[in-house]
Amino acid sequence: MADGVYDLESAGEMHHNVPTSFLGRSECEIDFKEDNEEIKDNTLEKLASKLLKHNFILTALEFHTELVESGRELPKLRDYFSNPGNFEKHIHETETSPALPRTSSVQTFDSLDFTRYSDDGERQVEERIAVLEFELRKAKETIKALRTNLTVATESDPNTPTSGSSKSIVQETVKPHEKRALNFLINEYLLCNSYKLTSITFSDENDDQDFEDWDDVGLNIPKPQNLLQLYRNYGRYMYLNNEVANKEIQTDAIPTAVKESDVCIKEACGLEKKKLLDQIAKLVHERDELAEVNQEKEKVEQKLKNLKREIKLLKMNSATESTEKGPSLSTADDKKSLDSADAQEYVIVSKQTDSPVIVHETFAPFKQGSESLDLNQSSKSISSNTSNEQSHKSERTVPYEFQKNLLSLCQTQKIAQDNRLIGEITDIVNSQDSVVSVLSRCLPHIVPNILLAKREELIPLILCAIALHPDPKERDKLLNILFNLIKRPDEEQRHMILTGLVAIAQHLGPSRVEAELLPQCWEQITHRYVERRLLVAESCGVLAPYVMSGIRSSLLLSMLHQMLQEDKDDLVRETVVRNLALLLLYVDDSDKFTKACKLLFLSLEDRALNVVDSGLNTLLPSIAAWSFELSNLESHLFPHVMSVLNNHFKVLSDIPLPSVLGSIQPEEQQIILFSRTISMLLPFLFVSVIKSGPYVENPDISCSSPVEFDVDRLPTYPSSVLNPSIIFGDGDELMSAVKAFDRYLNSEWYKPWDQHDWVVNEFLPWLHSIFSYVNSQRQAVVHDLVELLHNFCHLFGRSFTQKNIKPSFLSRLSIVESEKGAPNRSTYQDATIPIYVAGVLGALHQAEDRQELLEFLQDLLCSVSLNHLPDTSIKAALVELSSKKGYHELLLSVLWDGVVHNSPLVRVTAGRLFEILVGVVSESLLRTRVTPALVTLASDPEIVVRIATVPAFGAIMELSSQKDLLEKAHMQLQTFLDDQLYRDQHLLYVEVIRTFAKIGPNTEPKFRDEFVLPRLTALAAENNSTTNETKKMDIALALLEAYTAMSCCFMSEQLIAEAFLPGLRCLKLDLEVIAQEYVDSVTNIIQEFEAKLDLGRSVDSRPRTLSVTSPGSMEEMKNRVTKMFSARSAAVRPNIPNLFQLRKK
């Protein structure tokens, strides 16, 4: 397309044939009115032809515009610019160039009019320039939009060759208008065939196109036939193309011959085209006529069907009369018989026999609400083809008018003309509809009339109709009935519905499940009844195997995600989690794995425990199996869980210990939960490690010391999905792989592999890091981590534990002899030692392992004592080991070694540790091993050793039931308090008071009333005279703890007045001096018990206090209640009916 850039030759020709005013923009605006007389018509025609011939299109357009304005329009230019086909080629040419050069002749008609007729003149030049620039910009945008929307300007380009290779056609890129047309036809096909969800997705992916308006496709192309018609016509055209023979022509002929042959070919093609067009016109006309005939036929069939229904309605109303008289209504009168084309064949079964009598009859329709039936015509002729039918003929000839009037008198009941049931009944015999069609029509009317408790009986019928009905709209209605059949379906009813849905899904196929079943589920996702939402969640799980993969990973997953995130009912969320686990078994889109992990953590952080348990027991194994299948267990799932757990441990390390040891904080609960998550993932990690080892490629690998396979080699799990044999796929193959794994690791040296290195170099160091965050006094967290390590060591076996796990712990513990340096103090405060003792060493059960555990505990006892380290770690280790009966003898041996140790520091630590074993060992061990050791320590020459036994003796008083042991403990405690040897032993007093605070609420009441409380009062009174404020503070705080614990116990008034309150008052005096912040607490306790005493005294002072248990008091109470009710006025009674009257109003 030329934009005003002329070559020299064209410019020369233009210079001789046109005025110079057309050579530039500044000379373009000429007043043609002055030169109107000089320019002849033939000159204008030649000028226009010259411009068009040399493709000076824009110049010709300006020339045409100015001629139009001057009233001298040329037909040649008008025809050229009115035909959009002339611009097809130019558009393609301009698309190849990166940008169009500017031209001086590009102006819009609006700007020409403005500059010509504006009255502003030179005073508003700037405004006119701005307006012209705006007009120019607007015109360019309009041209661009027109070029975009202009699709097919002409059927073919005259300069394009008439033939081309099919290969080049196939390689052509799709044009924008072709793509939009195809998109429109595809969307139309999806909508017509009930692929609603696919159509919505397709529309969303092509959001730049309006699928409701064909004009959006193109400006000047008609809408083609639908895809089905195009496909069918394609087959016909292909058949025609196959019949065409290839022709060869001479290519070096004389040009004139070629032109003549072209003319002949064009003429022949024109004639053939005309014939084909005539045939097409005839076929179209015939098609239209056929369509009209079909419409008429449908109308006639509908009328005939209505007539049949009316006839049968009349027949049903006269059934009693007609059956009594048999075929007596028939007549041989041929004059009143109906035409055979309009007669209706009907079969009457006689009461005496089952032989049918075929009757032709027609009854006129009766009016709605009429009192009687109007029999207009009745003409019956009995077929005489067989002798059996002939024998059932009636020989009577009753006049027709008499029959009609008698029928009107007898049939007086009213029957509505549009009675649905009568229509269904009368159509049963002759109807060609199947049982499924009848069911689909009748079920919507049956369901509302059946009790809710019995509607479940309809489920098989509805499911059968859904599965077999051919009409999608009817199936959709029946599915809606099924989902809304029961208002709140219980578990059994939901199971019945789900079983039917699975059967339907197997029958229908994935596409129909997507188009018909899933929309019903989506509509119920926010239903107000919990049972309906449960049905939706369960449907997503059971239908997962029967839908296409894309639907599983998009629609079903999104539905369950929404319900898990938004549903407020715990039971619904629990069901969602379970069915999400089922769904993920069939999702094969690996991109959804990250989303599945997010859903897992969403369920684990739920506020409801049942949802959390469901996430752990079902969703976690499902995701772990998927991760194992994707081979990203070590690279994705484990790091994700480890990162979350690590953050929780960091938060826990900043939280102070609870005031009451043993209580569980919220953050501890989260840590315990995610620790269980890691423990449940270990079987998958183990299977991943053993399946990837180098011994798999060489199963005959062996070593000099083969390992026997123990029956208890693998731990047992509460859930079958965590069983390594289930994860592996075959139990026998798993055992073989485990044997090969143990033999390979039991060799003196082995070559590690990637999964093995990840466990050793990544997982174990991470475990040590989280152990360092936990204080050993957090018993619940320590116990859970011990179980984690115990499971880890048991699963991976003794060889892996000896060669990898134990060395990693020993390198961190740094247990060395005192002369070699001081041990790491922080290691003895965190959870590393108890986890190593109970989780690692406690997981190995051979004799040498037990001996190693014994020696480690002995060394630990000495190291803690001699280096003045905190004893919390060894206490936590003993607590974990003592929970298993098999370790009691070993622990007592360790402590006895401490009792007879030369260092008093070791003996002190051993005495404190006996308190742990008192409540867990058997009575025989308590009598024979524990008590003698405590008596030995109580007579130790070092007083600090004797003081260390006080908590253990207190534990015996609290937990033992043997009288001789209780007497020994009682005597020892009394000795500590009465013997002058312990006079002014501040540490002893503090230890005794703390022991009383611990055992007081749980010990024998006699021991508490006669020994503990009086001793506390004496110690409180003695503390008033203490001058050392530090000692006074220690005693006072210990007493406050003890009295607070005792305040929850039942005490007699005498004990309160003589022992409890005096001690509290002494304590109050001390606190007023040294710790005033606790005075209010003590004052409240004193006031509470003084109020109890005052209440008891006031009750005792009443002279006529009734005893509730005496018969006289019971009789007196009965009389009082009777008088109280009988004293009520009878006038109040009439008000009761008035309440109901007001309610009615």
Image (cartoon, rainbow, N blue to C red):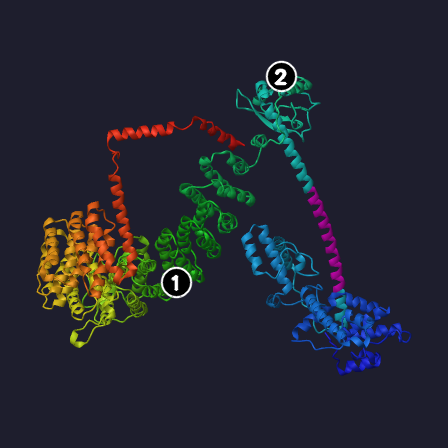
**Residue 392 against residue 948 in the figure, above or below:** above
Callout 2: SS: loop
Q: Which residue is mark 1?
A: 630
Report the mark closest to the observer, 1 or 2.
Answer: 1
**Residue 714 against residue 1124 in the figure, above or below:** below
Q: CA distance from mark 1 to mark 2?
A: 89 Å
Q: Is residue 737 visible?
A: no
Q: Is residue 557 left or right of residue 15?
A: left
Q: Is residue 40 left or right of residue 398?
A: right
- Magenta highlight on residue 271: yes
Q: What is the span of residues highlighted in magenta in the rendered image?
A: 265-293
Query: Crowding at label 2, few (<14), some or many (≥20) Cα neighbours within 10 Å?
Result: few
Task: Name the residue nearer the viewer: 803 or 606.
Answer: 606
Q: Which residue is mark 2?
A: 395
Callout 1: SS: helix
Task: Name the residue nearer the viewer: 321 or 679.
Answer: 679
In x, y percent, where is residue 1129? 42, 27
In x, y percent, where is residue 873? 22, 64
Name which residue type carries label 2.
Glu
Query: Crowding at label 1, few (<14), some or many (≥20) Cα neighbours within 10 Å?
Result: few
Task: Say which quarter of the image contains residue 255.
Answer: bottom right
In x, y percent, where is residue 219? 70, 61
